[in-house]
Image (spheres, helix red, strand yellow):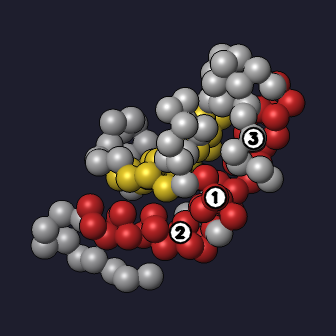
Amino acid sequence: MNWYRPCAYDAEQKHRFHREARKRLKHLAAELGFPPGSYDLRSNPGGIAVSGEITLHHEAVYIQICQPATGHDTGIMIRTCQGRLDYAGGRNHYEPLERLGDIPGLARRVREVLYVAAPPGACRRSS
């Protein structure tokens, strides 16, 4: 999958982008040990001029994939959250879209974000 081929004004590419991103996020959820039902997986295609977003929203982390309109390689956003009704969450952490080709590596990065965001005195586990 070429994650960098523009989706804007290309309905077929946008469909491929969303389908593949959903597959990768499901794989990421499994790699992170998230049981089925412990997260939501959403796809918002947006308008014709954008890629839209694909989101994995777990109780503790929110991961979103898109092709940023700015051209920066920040297509994967990871942030902590406090439940699936928290859409603002913690600080944003960005990764390049190419990380979707290395799900175990991306899972390590998600764990790092979760570890760093744990409140002082919280029990921190290493995975």
Q: How crowded is the residue under tag 1: few (<14 C-alpha within 10 Å), some, or many (20+)?
A: some
On the image, the x and y values in percent for residue 121 come to 13, 73
Q: Quadrant of residue 16?
A: top right
> 83 and 64: which one is in front?
64
Q: Amino acid at mark 3?
A: Arg
Which quadrant: the C terminus? Answer: bottom left
Q: Which mark is residue 107?
A: 2
Q: Tag 3, which secondary structure?
A: loop
What residue did someone put label 1 on?
Answer: 98
Q: Which mark is residue 5?
A: 3
Q: Tag 1, which secondary structure?
A: helix
Q: How crowded is the residue under tag 2: few (<14 C-alpha within 10 Å), some, or many (20+)?
A: many
Residue located 26% across and 61% down the image: 117
Q: Which mark is residue 35?
A: none
Q: Amino acid at mark 2?
A: Ala
Marks 3 and 1, the one that precedes in the sequence: 3
Residue closest to the far bottom: 126
Q: Amino acid at mark 1?
A: Glu
On the image, the x and y values in percent for residue 76 come to 53, 49
Residue closest to the far front: 71
Alpha carbon separation for disc pair 1 and 2: 14 Å
| Residue 55 visible in the snapshot | no
